[in-house]
Image (cartoon, rainbow, N blue to C red):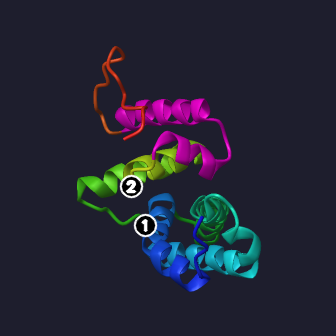
Amino acid sequence: MTILTFDAFARRQRRPLVAFAWALTGDLAAAEDLVQDALQAAWQDWDRVSSLDAPGAWVRRAVANRAAGQVRRAGREHRALARLAGRPARVVELEPADHQFWDAVRALPERQAQAVALFYLEDCPVAEIAQVLGCAPGTVKVHLHRGRQALAAALGLRVDDGTDLGEEEP
């Protein structure tokens, strides 16, 4: 196993981590902050993290956990501001289909959203997603299946239950 310096690791991982965090939060600035926090945590414990079989999985799990907390906080803040203003907050309409898709992904339960983002955004195989999320590969397949079903319903797409849903590794 080749030991990377933290700087080399961070340079290689930063861009895909920001994309992953954005897929989960929908907010680029928040995604960059989450990644910075996760990389800082990795740096602070780099001796241990760098010796792991998959330090990238460790930092992705850190990003996923931070994103889940950020989404919960943002929801609470949004509801509080709406109550204070006495009217619902304005929602910006995004036209491109990919924004609709990622908005639908963010509406999924946390683990489904994380599994879908890792699978489609980063082309991670099921085994790697399991390592990142700290669960069994079978559990990842269930999250992907349920996430795809929910996305199809949310986006008005038909899913043929008899077809392979692509739950095997890409």
Residue assigned mark 1: 19
Q: Classify 10 Å Cα crowding around label 1: few (below 14), some (14-19), many (20 and above).
A: many
Q: Nearer the viewer, residue 88 or 147?
A: 147
Placement of the N terminus among the 4 image quadrants? bottom right
- The residue drawn where x is 52% and y is 45% is 115
- The residue drawn where x is 61% and y is 32% is 139
Q: Main secondary structure of the magenta part?
A: helix
Task: Tell me if residue 151 is in the magenta stretch.
Answer: yes
Q: Relative to 121, is 85 on the left or the right?
A: right
Q: Is residue 35 above or below residue 155?
A: below
Residue placed furthest toward the left: 96
Residue 109 appears in the figure = no
Quick one: label 2 or label 1, which is nearer the N terminus? 1
Residues tagged 2 and 1 counted as in contact (Cβ below 8 A) = yes
Task: Tell me if residue 170 is in the magenta stretch.
Answer: no
Q: Is residue 21 above or below residue 100?
A: below
Q: Nearer the viewer, residue 85 or 75?
A: 75
Where is residue 69, by image quadrant?
Answer: bottom right
Q: Which residues are magenta?
A: 125-154
Residue 47 in the image, given as x and y percentages of width and height: 75, 76
Q: Amino acid at mark 2?
A: Leu
Q: Amino acid at mark 1?
A: Ala
- The residue drawn where x is 50% and y is 58% is 24
Q: CA distance from mark 2 to mark 1?
A: 8 Å
**Mark 2 element type:** helix
Q: Classify 10 Å Cα crowding around label 2: few (below 14), some (14-19), many (20 and above).
A: few
Residue 97 in the image, given as x and y percentages of width and height: 25, 53
Where is residue 42, by image quadrant?
Answer: bottom right
Q: Which mark is residue 121?
A: 2
Q: Which mark is residue 3?
A: none
Q: Is residue 137 above or below residue 72?
A: above
Residue 74 in the image, given as x and y percentages of width and height: 60, 66
